[in-house]
Image (cartoon, rainbow, N blue to C red):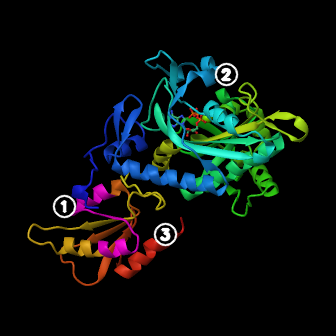
Amino acid sequence: MYFTKSFIPILKNNPSEAKIKSHQLMLRVGMIKQSSSGIYSWLPLGFKVMKKIEQIVRDEQNKIGAQEILMPTIQSSEIWKESGRYEDYGQEMLRIKDRQNREMLYGPTNEELVTDIFRASVKSYKSLPQLLYHIQWKFRDEVRPRFGIMRCREFYMKDAYSFDISDDAAFFSYNKFFLSYLRTFKRLDLVAIPMAAETGPIGGNLSHEFVILAETGESKIFTDKKIFEVNSDDTKLEKQSLEELRKKYEKFYAVTDEKFNNEEFEKKVTEQDRLITKGIEVGHIFYFGDKYSKPMGASVDLTGGKKVFVKMGSYGVGVSRLVGAIIEAKYDDKNEVMKWPISIAPYDVSIIPMINKNDNTALEKSIKINTEFIKNNIEAIIDDSDENLSSKLKKMNLIGSPFQIIIGNQADGDTLEFKETGKKSTHIKLDEVIKIIKKEKEKI
Ligand code: ATP
Ligand code: MG
């Protein structure tokens, strides 16, 4: 991609309306554009990152055997009346009337809709468990949309739903999602801690929030530092191993302020291990048994003619919020340097040629390098603008490719000035550059 042909509307300065660094960066490099309060368009750079995050989320859902579906954004109020949540959900739900005067709504979440899909087709216990997920826009009319896409009204979310025959089987499903979340956040190069959580309007009795530490987060968290040492690498996708994994985490005190109890905190955590800080909720999983299946009549037949209401859980990841959360974790706003994890970077590498009016050597060299990159599946952005080197570097530091190549105008010889974004340059050959970038990409 040539910078001059790209749609990356960069601003010279930080926009004054943005209070936190992710919002600043996203507006500054034109990842998003606000369309009205809490509602955003996603421009190419932002959309590219979000789509890569979505793909990792999807991949990890598929790996635990969840199946993807697509449900509509607009739902009928009927099913919400059946579950009893139409009134309860309150003002966060955007209610709409169609031309026949039927009550519709823009889905804030999809438990009812997926239960309706399930009950129409699944009749026997033999078809269980079922794990279904969708990645879709949701709308919640938040009282105070803020921090850009972190708390907005229309947002992109992965939500999964599990259907099981018993509590015990349902916990197995729950634990599969627990593991898939740990794996997802790891691939995004984030440290997310699972914290015991209140179940809120979704209801139920088992719930974890996945929170990443960040000064600008809205959740206050209280945790035992030892939780950061838990390792999930050797967990197998089988009942026993998953149970042990959850226990390994649950051993340590880790809650948000809703569940905080000081006496318990001081009793369970030694003074030097107590950590009180802030975090961003990037995922939330719930077990809620037959809360929806019972009022909505979603049951399966057992042997001997008995019926049982299916036991359900739901599992959300804020895909669009994750874009902001990763910036909060990775952006060095003092030096204005962003370095995306290579798994989701909009470009793997920025090629920065110094271009003089009458000398195209550096640009030509960039194009040749890019041809080699393309052969090796490496995606580059070439800054072909006629700005000076320091403003090009500034700009590319904001765009955040994990690697940069700087090509001087006396560009001869076959060594290149190569750097990891934010670090010092080295001079190496193109072959080695390709090797380094490919090796990084293989780790994904
Ligand atoms: P919060 O506590 O932040 O309001 P929630 O508990 O209402 O979130 P869930 O219903 O658990 O959210 O939704 C699953 C995920 O969707 C959350 O973990 C979060 O990452 C994301 N999410 C929820 N509300 C918003 C929002 N208004 N803007 C962006 N992402 C959101
Ligand atoms: Mg929550």
| Disc 3 from disc 1: Cα separation | 30 Å
Q: Residues within 10 Å of mark 2 (few under 14, many from 20)?
A: some
- Comes first in the chain, label 3 or label 2: 2
Please give the name of the residue rendered at 35% of the width and 35% of the height, measured from the top-left corner: 34
Please give the name of the residue rendered at 35% of the width and 46% of the height, measured from the top-left corner: 31
Numbered range of the magenta stretch: 370-396
Q: Residue under circle 2?
A: 82
Q: Secondary structure at mark 1?
A: loop
Q: Secondary structure at mark 2?
A: helix
Q: Secondary structure at mark 3?
A: helix
Q: Residues within 10 Å of mark 1 (few under 14, many from 20)?
A: few
- Comes first in the chain, label 1 or label 2: 2
Q: Quadrant of ligand 2?
A: top right
Residue in front for this viewpoint, 281 or 43: 43
Whether residue 337 is visible to the viewer of this picture, yes or no, is yes
Q: Among all residues in the image, which is located at the extreme top?
A: 101
Label 3 is placed on what type of residue?
A: Glu
Q: Residue under circle 1?
A: 388
Task: Tell me, yes or no, whether the highlighted magenta stretch contains residue 278.
Answer: no
Task: Please state if 263 lies on the left or on the right of 222 as rendered.
Answer: right
Label 1 is placed on what type of residue?
A: Asn
Task: Tell me, yes or no, whether the highlighted magenta stretch contains residue 383.
Answer: yes
Residue in front for this viewpoint, 167 or 98: 98
Using the image, tell me which numbered label, if any, was put on residue 440.
3
